[in-house]
Amino acid sequence: MAPRYAHYGGSTSGIYDAVIVGGAHNALVAAAYLAGAGKRVIVLERLGHLGGAAVSERPWPGVDARLSRYSYLVSLLPPQIIRDLDLRRRRYSSDRPDPVDATRGLLVDNADAVATTASFLRAAGDAREAERFAAFSDRLLPLAAAVFPTMTEPLRRESDMRGLVGDADLWESLTTRPLGVLLRASLQSDLARGVALTDGLIGTFSHADDPSLRQNRCFLYHVIGGGTGDWDVPVGGMGSVSGALEGAARAAGAELRTHAPVEAIDPDGVVRLASGEEIAGRLVLSGVGPAVLERLIGAGGGGGRVGGGPGEGAAGVEASAAGVAKAGRIDSFDPPEGAQVKINLLLRRLPRLRDPEVSPEAAFAGTFHINETMTQLDDAYAAAAGGGIPSPLPAEIYCHSLTDPTILGPELQAAGAHTLTLFGLQVPHRLAADADADAYRDTLLRAAQVSLDSVLAEPIMDCVYRAPDGSACIEVKTTTDLEHALGMAGGDIFHGALAWPWAGDDEPLDTPAARWGVATAHERVLVCGSGARRGGAVSGLGGHNAARAALELLG
């Protein structure tokens, strides 16, 4: 059957090589690569700006603070994408006050092994736990070094990847058994086990012994970044990342359009805007989530179920009730569901801690964990699964301004102000389903405040900066807020459960889209966002791999 764009006067002169739906960071990566290869590319973004969740904004009028409003750290960006980006490594990995006695805590200092050991002795009562923690971290390094370089290659087979990793026992532990088994065998303290388990629960509603292994998948993605598992702070905020990508796409010749909401997609290559304008392409690259893409294709008369995976929202519609089959994602068809709350704060100064041995500047320079022992994380899962807000709310915090003060204006810097970003775990989108949005936001803010205050020597509200109108500089973003603002179905920051970043030994890889992990059920539609096989987080991987597949298809 001839593609629908054949009716465009019988000529392809007005046809784009690729029409990219959604203008988040992955779409910009794809546009830059395709345009750089001489292809005619257009990006269509519903909002008035590009970048999706990877943006820097001033949330409080009259306050010169540019926050990474939604996403905030980077780890999975490949070297070839970030050569021109200024990223700063954090000295402190994490600080975790003991929830039983907050006058002691577990501070992991990457620059001082002696201090880290002393911290383990105080917090866990066992200096050898520091050795076990270091050994566990070291054991993951060959895994990261083996897996991460393959993320920008065609999918490896599972047996091939197993051979690259080399540690057969670690492979089996991560890919066949719940993460809790490995953590109990590797670490002895509930506190240290919780440090590791949180990497499996960011944006993922799960628990240590979840048989679905979705926590294992999430854990893997969090420990392989850069081949080391380190997480870096982008200077200038996340907006600097998207800004650099936008600049690269424009320089390469890509056409970038904002205020261009897409109403329907015909899988033969025609995209219809809400204005009625039709834009035709040899390929359509989808940066939106799978549920959004399914709806857009249905509106375009394409029908059928999308087989890609979650992407980066631009259309701003909710997930279909049935969910979307996400090829290679996970053995279920559950609709996307986020499981977090993000709270941005601007402080007059950093709060004092109950732990006299740790300065606030050290505690908040890394990831500050609150009420995140393994037991607490699993109890919080059980509470939320039963329909309640976890108490205490597990949360983690970082202070961007300690690593990169440029996000604050000169007056705020001089006054000693700082930002705090709190990320609350185990609050699945289902809890917001029947709740009043404002009341739910207030409930989560109170829960986060109580949890944070439990480890501080003073109430956090005593430190909050006030805007010129007297209002507190606090911003709460729930899963509902993400769904409405960014088109993230279910507020899912990964737009669906993550997949193993390799192909099964018997999985068909007979097309470029399949080999690169960007296929959908429609040959002319590729996934270029977080819904790609190796998508999720601010990585650019979905965009890079979709561009590589598209170049093979376009010739």
Image: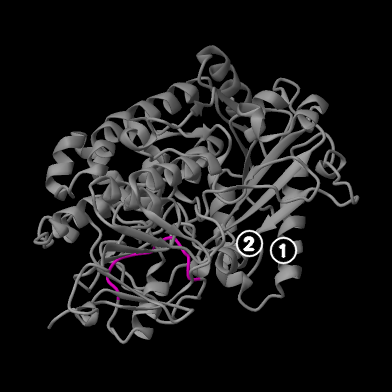
Reading the image, the residue beneath label 1 is 441
Task: Give the amino acid type for the residue marked by disc 1 in the picture.
Answer: Arg
Q: Position of residue 10 (x, y in %)?
A: 17, 78
- Residue 354 in view (yes/no): no
Q: Which mark is residue 317?
A: none
398 relative to 198 in the view: left or right: right
Magenta-colored stretch includes residue 384: no
Magenta-colored stretch includes residue 311: yes
479 relative to 78 in the view: left or right: right
User: What secondary structure do most residues of the magenta stretch adopt?
Assistant: loop
Task: Tell me the residue at 16%/47% (across/down).
Answer: 156
Q: Earlier in the sequence, mark 2 or mark 1?
A: 1
Which residue range is magenta in the image?
A: 306-315
| Mark 2 and mark 1 residues within 8 Å of each other at the beta carbon | yes
Give the quadrant of the C terminus.
bottom left
187 relative to 434 in the view: left or right: left
User: Pointer 2: residues within 10 angstroms few (<14), some, or many (20+)?
Assistant: many
CA distance separating discs 2 and 1: 7 Å
Helix, strand or loop status at disc 2: loop
Reading the image, the residue beneath label 2 is 478
Task: Give the amino acid type for the residue marked by disc 2 in the picture.
Answer: Thr
332 relative to 7 in the view: left or right: right
Residue extending furthest right? Answer: 470
Q: Where is residue 3 in the image (x, y as percent from the top left)?
A: 18, 78
- Residue 315 in view (yes/no): yes
